[in-house]
Amino acid sequence: MLEALGLRERKGLDLIACPSCGRAEIDVIAVANAAQVALSDRNLPLQVAVMGCVVNGPGEAREADLGIAAGKHKGHLFIKGKIIRVVPEDEMVQALVYEAEKIVAEGLEARLALADEGAEREAEEDRRALLEEKGADANHSEDVIVKIRKNLDAAAFVARVLRATTQV
């Protein structure tokens, strides 16, 4: 809380990752673990986000100093939610390390000023493609809710039957 209020500077790495969803095209946990290993020894005072998809990732993690959101075999690198460049999937962790070191050395504003002009457009194209392919409800939440309700109804029925048979 003190860091959020600006009363204490961040010390060391704070890595956050999304829980993943049906849109994730990468193993978010593996990328987050690799990023944690690669960045933790550097003692960089940053919040870094590893997000599974470019649809929600940059927006959900817009308060992170730096982050990466997966797209179609690529990573969308962002600073404070603004896409600054796109890298191949197998270079995502290295790009995070490079950019983290540059942010600490040069500052956020300097790095934002060097953003690739086409990165935001490419991210938008990947967002649209993922939404078209996977839909807005990639986890099929409505179907899950229906199944949960059916299970609850079945459990309630079993409980009523058990109560009725034990009263006899």
Image (cartoon, rainbow, N blue to C red):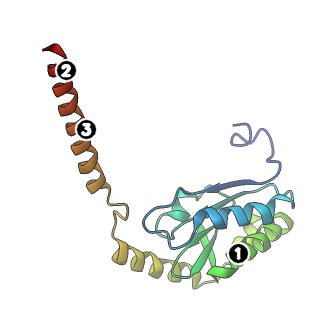
Q: Residues within 10 Å of mark 1 (few under 14, many from 20)?
A: few
Which picture quadrant has residue 129? Answer: bottom left
Q: Which residue is drawn at the image coordinates 74% and 60% (left, top)?
A: 36
Q: Which residue is mark 2?
A: 163
| Mark with earlier residue (1, 2) | 1
Residue nearest the observer in this picture, 48 or 105: 48
Tell me the CA gap for discs 3 and 1: 54 Å
Determine the residue located farthest toward the top in the rendered image.
167
Residue 16 is left or right of residue 137, and the answer is right
The amino acid beneath tag 3 is Leu
Q: Secondary structure at mark 3?
A: helix
Q: Residue at x 46, y 62 (%)?
A: 21
- Residue at coordinates 64% horizontally, 83% vertically from top-left? 116
**Residue 67 in view of the camera:** no
Residue 167 image point, x, y percent: 16, 14
In which quadrant of the rendered image does the C terminus lie? top left
